[in-house]
Structure formats: C-alpha cells, structure tokens
Amino acid sequence: MPYIERDGVKIHFEEEGRGEPLLLLMGLGAGLSAWEPHRQVYRNYFRCISVDNRGAGLSDSGKAEDCTTESMAADAAAVLDSLDIKGAHVAGISMGGAIAQMLAVFRPELVKSLLLINTFARPAPYMRRIMGTFQDCYDCLTPLAFDRLLQEFIYSPATFAGHPEVLAERERELEQNTESRMTADAFRAQCEACMGHDALPYLERIRVPALVVAGKADILTPLSYAEELKNRIPGAKLYVNEGGHVQHFEHLDVFNRITLEFLKKCPGQKEAGI
C-alpha cells in the first residue's frame, strides 16, 4: 500500500485509472474508500488519487494541534509531489472541500480545477455547535448509536421517509467494519480542523474553474455556505442537487453525471474516455 511521510506522519493514498490526475479528498471521519461510488465512474476518464486524511483510514494521526485544513492540504500536496504530478483536478467533500480550498490557495500551481461538494469557507456558529456535539458524543456512544445521531444531520428527510433501506444498509456496513473506526482523539482533531477553517480571506485568489455542489436539504453545510463559495471564487458555478449533506450518495447518478460533465470540460481534459 502506498504511503508518503510528511513531518513524521505517514499518509496513505491509492491510485487507479488513467488520464488527467484527479485528487479526491474525503470529509470528516471518513477514509478514502468512501469515494468508491464515484471512483467507479471517474476512473474511466481520470487517474484518481484518493488520500486518507491524517487520522482517517490507514493514515497516521500525528499531533492533534497539527491537524488543520492547511496541514492536510500540505499532506495532499506531498502526495502529488511524490508522484511528480505538476497539476491535478481536485475534488473535496465537506472537510475535504475545505482542504481543497487551502490547496488551491497555498499551492495554486497544483490545482487545475476545483470541485467543492457540501463544504464551507468558514463555519458559522450553528456548524460549530454541531461539531462540538459530535466531539462530545463520539466516544461516549456506541459506534452504532453515534452513527444514528450522525444520520440525523447528513441525510435528508426524504431518505428517512422514502428509503429506509439506505439507512439499514449503512448500519449493516458499520456493524461489519468497526475496526476502521477513527480513534476519539483523531476524530476530535478533525472536528477542530473544521471549526478552525477559514478560507474566506483567500478565496478571491483562486483562478481555476470551480464547481460548487450543494444539497438543497443540507443542514450541516447549508445552501448559504455554497452560495458564499460561489460568490467569492471568481467564475465559480453552483449546482444544487436534491438531498442533504450526503446528496452525493442519496442522488448518486445525478451527482456523478453533473460532476463528471464539469471535470471533462475543464482545460486539458479529453472529451472521450480511455
């Protein structure tokens, strides 16, 4: 399994597919395997580089105080540098989108385009309060109980009402895969990274094609966050999907189609698959 080491912290990543490089950055508490429903489509057109953020998946945690969106952007940059990749399209979900913003600001030469999904430039007090609740509950609840709490914030009411099988399947997967759960310290550190993120002063520096994707029913990173990103990043476009914070799972086919269309139209990308 491929790793790089930066400042004594091992960062795990995976590669698959061929074509223009596409860097995939996942959100709070999740490993790179969560990209699989999207990689199944992307890898037909792109060389997908998926990264386990520090503390998640198979990556080391490092010191809690070193876990910031800027440091995780530096981790991602180190992965690209190790592969001698001079530029990549960059997609990030939630916290991963915050990391992608920092990468575009502080290593702009590495970023060809930005796909920012259910993410934020600066957390509002409501989001900070939710993150604090997640921190308090992570290790005082069973994994299943915590996941049920999390579901209340990330799935839309329509999924609870019309697709209970989606939630049941998630619970089955969790029961079978408890070994990959983050430690409480690592989870708290990622929450702190989210709460400390502030890219607002820098967004106008970004000069690459950017698509912001939001869920109409997202209460964790509401539509106003997406509109703020769209308005602050020069030339950015906004697509509002049905669904909540995980609209990319709830409406998978639509999400994959819209995001793939954007990525394929970005400069340097061939129209046809390979």
Image (cartoon, grey):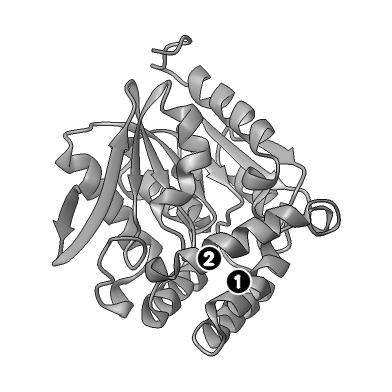
Q: Which residue: 43% across, 75% down? A: 187
Measure how far apart labels 2 and 1 are at the Cα level.
Answer: 8 Å
Residue 158 in view here: yes
Query: On the picture, is 17 further left or further right than 192?
Result: left
In which quadrant of the rendered view does residue 104 lie? top left
Estimate the x, y position of residue 150 in percent, counting from the top left.
64, 70
Q: Residues within 10 Å of mark 2 (few under 14, many from 20)?
A: some
Three-letter code, disc 2: Leu
Q: Which residue: 18% across, 52% down? A: 3
Q: Quadrant of the image for the C terminus?
A: top left
The single residue placed furthest to the right in the displayed view is 161
Q: Residues within 10 Å of mark 1 (few under 14, many from 20)?
A: some
Q: Looking at the image, do the residues carrying marks 2 and 1 touch, with CB atoms under 8 Å apart?
A: yes
Query: On the picture, is 113 further left or further right than 172?
Result: left
Q: Which residue: 57% across, 31% down? A: 259
Residue 231 in view here: no
Q: Nearer the viewer, mark 2 or mark 1?
A: 2
Local SS, label 2: helix
Q: Which residue is mark 1?
A: 147
Estimate the x, y position of residue 153 in percent, counting from the top left.
70, 67
Q: Which residue is mark 2?
A: 174
Local SS, label 1: helix
Q: Nearer the viewer, residue 185 or 36?
A: 36
